[in-house]
Amino acid sequence: MRYDYLIVGAGLYGAVFAREAVKAGKTCLVIDKRPQIAGNVYTREIEGINVHVYGAHIFHTNSREVWEYVNQYASFNRFTNSPVANYHGELYSLPFNMYTFNRMWGVTTPQEAAAKIEEQRKAAGITEPKNLEEQAISLVGTDIYEKLIKGYTQKQWGRPCDQLPAFIIRRLPVRLTFDNNYFNALYQGIPTGGYTKMVERMLEGIAVRLNVDYLAQKQELDQLADKVIYTGPIDAYFGYRLGALEYRSVRFETEILDMPNYQGNATVNYTDSETPWTRIIEHKWFEFGDQPKTVISREFSSEWKPGDEPYYPVNDEKNNALYARYRELAEKEPHIIFGGRLGEYRYYDMDAVIAAALAKSREELRR
């Protein structure tokens, strides 16, 4: 059978594009090299708990259109992301708010907290932040930077904070209120039953083939469709001919524990540099679980190498320049659309992935 679209990748971008194309009367084949659908939002049930296999995913958006779109395929609970930071056993609220400032400095009013931050900013002599370290200190002061940002960020990115661009934490939530909601989003939650069920519904009635490596069988697979939607790494598509883009990868150690409650929160970040993992996820708390056992995952950040899963693009000047050259090559491929986090070499939140796929499908299907 020949299809209108071959969609490489059964994650959110591919699933949304496929759904919209089929609604418009087009035929699609979705393939994925993994043995399951849903990309990095894949959830698997263990001990009655929906485990986020590739790391915590909390859906949040300010877009009513995107919220209404996903609610066609899932019902969402009222989960609010309120992480905890653990620094050598000291626990702090995230995002940085009045609870954090009270724990750190003993201040009780917004005026006292603001004055403390300003005092430390002035002492550091920062007027125009040139890197992540200076940006962090200008936002929250030296004490919070040293305890709650420095170690965690260096583990996550594998680089000293003074060698990372300031924009990485430009949107760091800092609030002079007693508000533990990390995301300042109008809509937020976790799909009841997990993300895999949501993506299954998006792909209902659409041909899907798993365990298929597109780049290994490209010539044969390209014959199956008029056009390809490619959501894999853009540099891999071109055989790394201009060099490899850099990513950060994540390794997970997941355990089933014979206890009902391990840490009392879905996410605890370990912000000291000595603890090797960046955070521990306790999956049952994403859905207010009451199971007799619990499942935790420790996350370890690492530099990406071939064979690893690429997670976070390293969007510094050097890599962005290299991506721009790959983008020029991509524009010469008339029958290929590059989309998603890997195809566009940019970090997307889930709602942005969905919005981008909707926009691209509408543009494409109008032709």
Image (tube, rainbow, N blue to C red):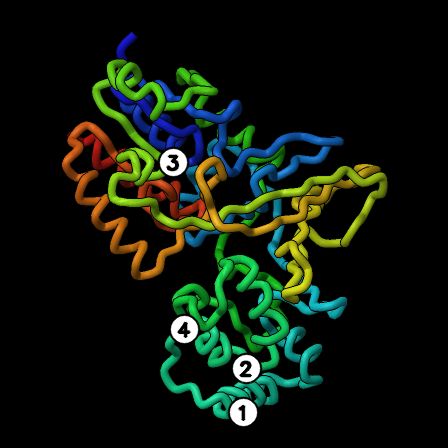
User: Looking at the picture, does residue 8 appear above or below residue 152?
Assistant: above
For the residues bearing labels 1 and 2, Cβ distance under 8 angstroms: yes
Q: Are marks 1 and 3 in contact (CB under 8 Å)?
A: no
User: Badge 3 is on which residue?
Assistant: 13
| Residue 309 rendering spot, x and y as whole percentages | 48, 39
Looking at the image, residue 253 sits to the left or right of residue 323; the answer is right
Q: Can see residue 143?
A: yes
Q: Is residue 171 left or right of residue 104?
A: left
Horizontal placement of 321 versus 297: left or right?
left
**What is the quadrant of residue 111 in the picture?**
bottom right
Circle 2 residue: 141
Say what amino acid the circle numbered 2 marks. Answer: Gly
> Where on the picture, by quarter, is residue 237?
top left
Left or right: residue 347 compared with residue 41: left
Under mark 4, the amino acid is Asn
How far apart marks 3 and 2 lie (CA) works out to 39 Å
Of pointers 1 and 3, the one earlier in the residue sequence: 3
Disc 1 designates what residue? 119
Q: Nearer the viewer, residue 174 or 158?
A: 158
